[in-house]
Amino acid sequence: MDATTNCVLPRYRVVRDEAACTGCAQCVRSCANGVHRLRKDPDRIVINSRACVNCQRCVVFCPELALTIRPWPQVGTGSSTWTAEAMADIAKQAQTGAVLLSSMGTPAPYPIYWDHLLLNASQVTNPSIDPLREPMETRVFLGSRPEILKINERERRVVEPLPPQLKLDVPIMFSAMSFGSISLNAQKALALAATELGTFFNVGEGGMHCDLEPFADHAFAQVASGRFGVDAHYLNTAAAIEIKIGQGAKPGIGGHLPGEKINSEVSRTRMIPEGSDAISPAPHHDIYSIEDLRQLIFSIKEATGYRKPVAVKIAAVHNAAAIASGMARTGADIIVVDGFRGGTGAAPKRIRDAVGIPVELALAAIDQRLRDEGIRSMVSLVASGSIRNSADVVRAIALGADACSIGSAALIAMGCHQCRDCSSGRCNWGIATQRAALTARLRPEEAAERVVNLVRAWTAEIQEMMGGMGINAVDSLRGNRLMLRGVGLNEKELDILGVKYAGE
Amino acid sequence: MTDATHTLDAGKAEAAAGTAALTGGTATGEVTLGLAHFKEANEQVRKALASADAVVVRDANAQRYLGCALPAGKSLDILGTPGNDLGCYLDGGAIVVHGNGQDQVGNTMNDGAIVVHGRIGDAAGYAMRGGTILVRGDCGWRAGIHMKEYAGKRPAIVIGGDAGAFLGEYMAGGVIVVGGTPGDYVGTGMHGGVIYLRHPLSAESIMDGLIQELVGDEDIPQLAALLAAYDEAFASEGPPLGGDPGSWYCLRAASARPYGGLYAH
């Protein structure tokens, strides 16, 4: 065995039910990883399980349901320390000397606090509301609120202009995902869905492709450390601008889009040469302090005539509350906090699995800190990172969020099966790839319809849950922690979350 | 690197110096900033620019964002000291500073020209993708960090004096020219573009992955053009920077993919 010997066992075993298989070769056409291959003489399909990433494209599209993907059946050592995964990681690094790259949020079994927070419902007193019969407001506005609203009562108008606000018909937006990391068709699907739903998508840090400009009224433009695609036109085209300081999947580090993903379209949108690596430094090199952040926020406000809200996104980390307090005072209109179980980007595995804190705790701590300091209304607060369903949205809003962003959930609606192999560029669902043959599999209108369906369904559920609590507007749910009770949490966790124990 | 499809933006700097308001021209506006807050100051400047292509800004006292996103055809002549983020997102306009600049001159600039008849602070030309910055004197740390070039645009920064540490860090394209001595860690993480140095770095201060050599024939036209632009802009203020371009050194990345082998899937 020399240094290049691959002693990593396959992760999956692809099993074909030969009795059911008709040899139609749909699986062969489905798989860009080359798991299924057609052999002539005699005609048969052979399987290379080692290449399988468990994206389940072949399973879903097999007309005979003849395929299943199972874990590789090799028994472990029985050790809780040296699990098969821990050993495979070491073997891979011994072979390559490289940093392990993976994708999406951490799959590690950290506590999911959403699942320890239970919602209230009205019984007898303060009757519940039937959303089918009564108006139920899901509209929210994002932006800074003035301390005092001066009104000319005779003319019934606001005297001083309000800071710029974004109107969301539903309290759910789509997280930042750049062109390059995902396909243009996937971005178009989110753009179409955001427009249809009356909410916002986020072009991420890779610039805005000209095909997305018709949807720019529903777009956040992102400014990250690499400043890809950032110019005056970009800033003024979007509805709002988000400065990305950090993201949940990889707090504290920059980004690295490999040259092989920089084709001519990605190059044009990012405004960098084809084939060159797109490196986002870990910090913004004009931000070394809160004062510097203020400087960047106001440079964007100057460039956009103070007409657009400026959001700042941070990863949920240890001192998130203190950092958010600083951000609110810098002139940010919206604070976005992204938890480590979320994330759609390619990220070094160790960073993804070891850095950051759960968004529930960060969100609760930030909301409380801003309230304690009397500056909560200076900013809107958006939570993202592992929002899995409508109940998570309700919990996040009750913990203090004005709205939530979903990334993984929207991708799953489009077909993503969370194989976490985004960085390879061979996404069989046409999402995290730039290969024309693969991106053509994702038709924007169809994918948008699925995303719209998802958000509509969640909105109906949110209305029902709110109605059950006797609440008829998202605004009345925000920060309403009395609607939450904890189960299976210790005193400290309850304290940080600001909720009582179930039964109290 | 010096193929003919890229037009160096040096000519624009000369044009900027030539068309700037103080040297004449029609429809010149004028504003005096004094101690105005940057928001008010920039409103005044924008108002003046609405009715004049060239505006003289007097008594600048560290107001930030002057010339923010200034479009082509517009120019500012600034007397006093403009504040941080001078000419941020500059979009083809021309700015001349008759004095010193502060931090982040030409931050994320897209096109145009900035000429500073003095010295400037840190992080000049951060992420710039087009246009030219000419500085008569020294610059602070991290000048030209993450410069990039794209689609026929090749940004350039010429520093007549010394440069602070981390010059051209993460540089992905474009040209930096330094007439004096650069600080430590020149070109850390550089993966494109070129840095021209009048005085070579000592062997031990060349960062891993970079190659320093005497300029080649293919470098001389663009280096000579930038030196000429500098000499013309600052002709009355000191000796020319130029000399023989063939005696300069260039610093380039050995690979456009310095982190290609960093990751395993």
Image (cartoon, coloured by chain):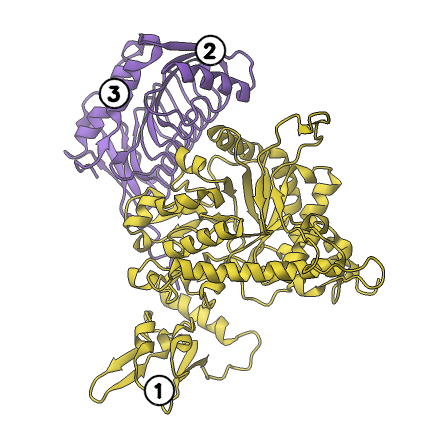
Chain colours: A yellow, B purple
Secondary structure under tag 3 reads: helix
The answer to the question of whether label 3 and label 1 lie on touching residues, with beta carbons closer than 8 A, is no
> Same chain, marks 2 and 1?
no
Against B238, residue A326 (above or below) is below
Q: Which residue is mark 2?
A: B31
Q: Which residue is mark 3?
A: B229
For marks 3 and 1, give the one nearer the viewer. 1
Q: Residue at x 35, y 44 (%)?
A: A210
Foreground residue among A3 and B83: B83
Quadrant location, the C terminus of chain A: bottom right
Residue B218 visible in the picture: yes
Foreground residue among B84 and A121: A121
For marks 2 and 3, give the one nearer the viewer. 2
Against A205, residue B50 (above or below) is above
Where residue A109 sits: x, y (%)?
59, 68
Against A63, residue B201 (above or below) is above
Against A429, residue A15 (above or below) is below
Chain to which the residue tagged by mark 3 belongs: B
